[in-house]
Image (cartoon, rainbow, N blue to C red):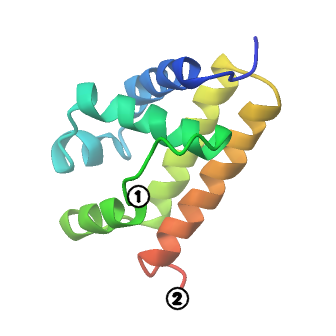
Amino acid sequence: MTDIKNRDDLLFLMQEFYSTMLKDEEIGYIFTDVAKLDLKHHLPLLADFWNNALFHTGGYKNNVVQIHKNLDVLEKLTPEHFKRWQFLLIASVDANFTGEISEKMKLRASQIGMTIQAKLGHYS
């Protein structure tokens, strides 16, 4: 296995991650039934988000916290939801990539999850 090198790798990883996550009994429904994601639209945005988070490209401008606040109104997002999301993301990274950037992505996922939860009031 190689490390994550670019946006193409991240798009592939998001496709792999979402193919698993959407079927997950614990959190899949949030994406399919609540958020009703249009994956054709959403996956490139996620690749841009992670490309910026890992390689500082500046290619993502959406407010991630606000997106999750809007979703939290529709379905209360719990710490357990975030733990499951992180577990599935780490498993997807580990199944497909290895190296410094892969480890950075797993750390950033943890940090992002904690930040969003704090902004949702889970750590007040």
Q: Residue at x 55, y 54 (%)?
A: 83
The kind of residue tagged 1 is Val
Amino acid at the residue labelled 2: Ser
Circle 1 or circle 2, nearest the eye: 1
| Residue 45 disc label | none
**Location of mark 1 (residue):** 64
The vertical placement of 91 against 115, above or below, is above
Which quadrant holds the N terminus? top right
Percent from the top left, x then y, of residue 51? 56, 36
Residue 117: x and y, percent? 49, 70
Dot 1: what SS?
helix
Q: Residue 124 got which mark?
A: 2
Which percent across, then down, holds residue 93?
Answer: 64, 28
Mark 1–mark 2 Cα distance, whole angstroms, equals: 19 Å
Q: Is residue 13 left or right of residue 104?
A: left
Dot 2 falls on a residue whose secondary structure is loop
